[in-house]
């Protein structure tokens, strides 16, 4: 009755890729201004269409500037969809094999108010106007702190297109300045980090989704993510499709003939799981597990477990892959249904104390589009006692 082993990561894949993409257009990220044309913050991977051309030349899925014939270099200002702490970047040059930007740097700013200028419509082949350049000059973005110094980029071949940069910057960021030297192409910019909300402005009597990425929730580990990463479950709104959720591979230890218990829940030896740190510790009063779009591949059942960890304890658990850790049951096993929003109220939950971390467990496998944990942010002033709460058997 063992869990699936976590797949061995590629040696070059950094840990910060588990964080949320704070600049993705699906969470509100957008380009505020640029020197020549728009960079891409789209969620979908870049594509290459050999026959696609525009009046300005070959169509490329990303940000490609003219070949520069004047002093300076190209740059753009990006507004994060979710302000927060940044841990790393992926500057993706996919398909820019003879026209990628040779060098890049990234600067960061934290603006009290967003810039008043906006860019509308298709900007292909267009430069920023004089008025836009004058407006952005007031931001003094050229002197913002550097998160990534001038660094070389590799061309967009499949084995080297992802250029990863780890960041050590402990200040909240709302905007980025992406500089390319001197010109060229970048297909995608991924900004990995954790959202940071002003919790002092949230009433202790107000229920909020404590695990939402906009409130600082983040995935810290999982057993399998073959078709979709668990961080998708804490995204905005309802899922657009199955790709906008967490979906695992089919477990190979499923019994040849399936049996159920008196509640109709499959009796299987294996399970899959995903661990999240809440944006703020709190008492969870209701839970939503949404299997929207998962019609023939939803999990048979789920349960939710919780605990309270210090940052030091969290680091230890992450280092051990969340093995050998006793969780407390928050939501006992529940039968799930296809393409359905499941709501569980306070009476169905078994913990009434503040928690900081949760683990969603599904059996035997399948897909979940959204996870919502509604509750009230609460300060934790003492080590919790678990004497009156049932421990998970896993």
Image (cartoon, rainbow, N blue to C red):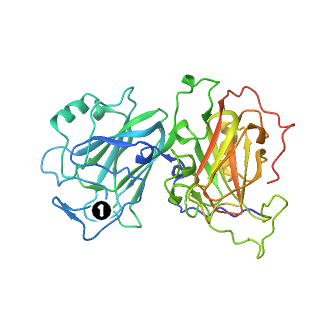
The 10 Å Cα crowd at callout 1, few under 14, some 14 to 19, many 20 or more, is many
What residue occupies the far bottom of the structure in this picture? 256
Residue at 25%, 49% (x, y): give it.
181
Residue at 18%, 54% (x, y): give it.
66
Q: Look at the image and tell me whether residue 356 can be seen.
A: no
Residue 287: image location, x then y, percent = 67, 42
What residue occupies the far left of the structure in this picture? 69
Looking at the image, residue 353 sits to the left or right of residue 184; the answer is: right
Q: Is residue 57 above or below residue 290?
A: below
Looking at the image, residue 127 sits to the left or right of residue 268; the answer is: left
Residue 291: image location, x then y, percent = 61, 55
Q: Is residue 62 above or below residue 145?
A: below
Residue marked by disc 1: 96
Q: Is residue 81 above or below residue 41?
A: above
Quadrant in the picture for residue 188: bottom left
Quadrant in the picture for residue 129: top left
Looking at the image, residue 169 sits to the left or right of residue 161; the answer is: right
Residue at 61%, 37% (x, y): give it.
210
Residue 53: image location, x then y, percent = 21, 65
Residue 298: image location, x then y, percent = 64, 61
Q: Is residue 227 above or below residue 143?
A: below
Quadrant in the picture for the C terminus:
bottom right
> Depth check: 371 or 324 in front?
371
Q: Look at the image and tell me whether residue 175 can be seen.
A: yes
- Secondary structure under tag 1 reads loop
> Depth check: 393 or 206 in front?
206
> Depth check: 221 or 281 in front?
281
Quadrant in the picture for the N terminus:
bottom right
* Total numbered labels placed on residues in the image: 1
């Amino acid at each position: 009755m063992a869990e699936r082993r976590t797949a061995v990561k590629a040696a070059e894949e950094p840990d910060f890729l588990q964080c949320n993409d704070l600049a993705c257009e699906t969470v509100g990220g957008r380009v505020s201004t640029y020197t020549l044309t728009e960079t891409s913050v789209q969620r979908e991977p870049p594509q290459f269409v050999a026959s696609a051309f525009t009046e300005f030349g070959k169509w490329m899925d990303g940000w490609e500037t003219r070949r520069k014939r004047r002093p300076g270099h190209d740059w753009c200002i990006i507004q994060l969809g979710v302000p927060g702490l940044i841990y790393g970047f992926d500057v993706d040059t996919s398909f820019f094999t003879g026209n990628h930007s040779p060098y890049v740097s990234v600067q960061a700013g934290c603006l009290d108010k967003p810039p008043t200028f906006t860019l509308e419509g298709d900007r292909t082949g267009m430069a920023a106007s004089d008025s836009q350049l004058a407006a952005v000059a007031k931001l003094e973005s050229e002197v913002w702190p550097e998160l990534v110094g001038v660094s070389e980029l590799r061309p967009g071949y499949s084995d080297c297109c992802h250029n990863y940069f780890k960041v050590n910057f402990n200040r909240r960021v709302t905007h980025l300045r992406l500089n390319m030297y001197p010109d060229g192409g970048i297909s995608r910019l991924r900004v990995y980090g954790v959202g940071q909300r002003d919790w002092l402005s949230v009433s202790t009597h107000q229920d909020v989704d404590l695990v939402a990425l906009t409130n600082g929730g983040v995935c810290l580990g999982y057993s399998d993510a073959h078709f979709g990463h668990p961080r998708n479950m804490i995204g905005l709104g309802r899922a657009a499709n199955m790709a906008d959720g967490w979906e695992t591979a089919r477990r190979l230890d499923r019994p040849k003939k399936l049996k159920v218990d008196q509640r109709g829940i499959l009796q299987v030896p294996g399970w899959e799981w995903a661990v999240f740190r809440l944006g703020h510790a709190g008492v969870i009063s209701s839970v939503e597990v949404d299997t929207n779009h998962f019609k023939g591949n939803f999990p048979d059942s789920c349960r939710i477990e919780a605990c309270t960890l210090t940052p030091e304890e969290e680091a230890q658990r992450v280092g051990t892959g969340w093995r050998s850790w006793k969780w407390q049951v928050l939501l006992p096993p529940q039968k799930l249904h296809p393409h359905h929003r499941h709501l569980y109220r306070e009476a169905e939950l078994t913990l009434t104390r503040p928690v900081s971390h949760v683990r969603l467990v599904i059996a035997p496998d399948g897909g979940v589009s959204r996870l919502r944990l509604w509750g009230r942010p609460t300060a934790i002033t003492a080590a919790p006692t678990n004497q009156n709460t049932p421990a998970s058997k896993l």
